[in-house]
């Protein structure tokens, strides 16, 4: 008797999967619907608003082209401005003007640089589309005022004003529905595979000989009435 080696008959496994195909499909559909419903009606939605700030490079009066030195300086200065706009001094003023907690402002905003260009993207993500727009608008306004008064910087402009976008950026219905269907597939497929592994019945002559280690001398046919 050979009890130490686990062998898997793939043909039998595929037959069992085919037999339970309806169960697998039903499980995928149910889990996908559940994931979609939870995403659409239960999970909190997040809304984003953003604006882009451009550092204008000086144009050489003689050649009519952008000054290379100014362009290089602006690119290097972007990182400094990114840290400044996220600083406590500016965030406190934004929170005070909007009458919200400074931690909420800090957790909502993100400032990025497009491929080391002279453009800064300022984005706010909250549970309210209007609040997201107000945070970005107030933040850029206060930032412009600060750099103008304290650093005497005049070469900044807003490329696009923040808008109230009522389409949530998260959670993603499509992604969560797909994940739900995948989980349904894994759960039902895993169940079928587990029942196959735990099923110790000997169905064929070959299985009996492999399991017992002795030849089968006779077979008794079974007929369903």
Image (spheres, grey):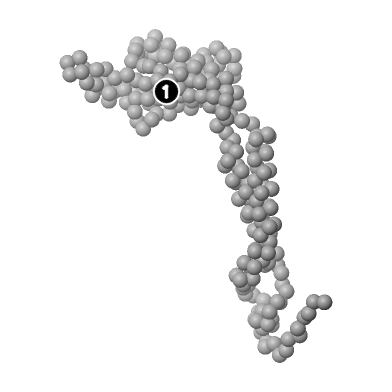
Looking at the image, how many numbered discs can be counted on the residues? 1
Which residue is at a point 60% across and 26% down the rendered structure image? 127
Q: Position of residue 88 (x, y in %)?
A: 49, 19
The quadrant of the image that shows the N terminus is bottom right
Residue 196 visible, this angle: yes
Instruction: Say which residue label 1 marks.
Output: 52
Q: Image quarter for residue 25? A: bottom right
Which residue is at a point 45% across and 26% down the rendered structure image? 111
Residue 87 visible, this angle: no
- In this view, the residue in front, 45 or 112, is 45
Residue 183 in the figure: left or right of residue 56: right
Which residue is at a point 53% across and 26% down the rendered structure image? 48
Asked if 63 appears above or below 203 in the picture, the reply is above
The quadrant of the image that shows the C terminus is bottom right
Which residue is at a point 68% across and 34% down the rendered structure image? 42
Classify 10 Å Cα crowding around label 1: few (below 14), some (14-19), many (20 and above). Answer: many
Q: Pick out the residue farthest to the top.
A: 149
- In this view, the residue in front, 219 or 121, is 219
- In this view, the residue in front, 177 or 138, is 177
Residue 155 in the figure: left or right of residue 100: left
Q: Position of residue 170 (x, y in %)?
A: 57, 33
Asked if 117 appears above or below 211 in the picture, the reply is above
Asked if 143 appears above or below 48 in the picture, the reply is above
- In this view, the residue in front, 132 or 34, is 34
Residue 87 in the figure: left or right of residue 119: right
Residue 152 in the figure: left or right of residue 214: left
């Amino acid at each position: 008797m050979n009890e130490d080696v686990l062998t898997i008959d793939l043909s039998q496994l595929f037959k069992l999967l085919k037999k339970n195909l309806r169960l697998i499909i039903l499980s995928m559909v149910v889990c996908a619907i559940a994931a979609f419903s939870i995403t659409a009606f239960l999970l909190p939605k997040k809304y984003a608003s953003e604006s882009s700030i451009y550092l204008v490079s000086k144009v050489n009066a003689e050649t009519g082209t952008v000054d290379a030195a100014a362009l290089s300086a602006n690119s290097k200065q972007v990182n400094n401005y990114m840290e400044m706009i996220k600083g406590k001094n500016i965030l406190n003023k934004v929170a005070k003007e909007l009458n919200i907690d400074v931690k909420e402002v800090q957790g909502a905003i993100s400032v990025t640089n497009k491929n080391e260009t002279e453009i800064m993207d300022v984005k706010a993500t909250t549970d309210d589309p209007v609040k997201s727009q107000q945070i970005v608008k107030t933040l850029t306004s206060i930032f412009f005022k600060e750099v103008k008064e304290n650093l005497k910087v005049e070469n900044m402009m807003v490329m696009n004003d923040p808008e109230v976008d009522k389409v949530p950026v998260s959670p993603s219905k499509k992604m969560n529905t797909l994940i739900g269907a995948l989980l349904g597939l894994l759960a039902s497929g895993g169940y079928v595979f587990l029942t196959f592994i735990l099923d110790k019945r000997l169905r064929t002559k070959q299985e009996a000989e492999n399991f017992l280690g002795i030849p089968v001398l006779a077979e008794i046919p079974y007929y369903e009435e």
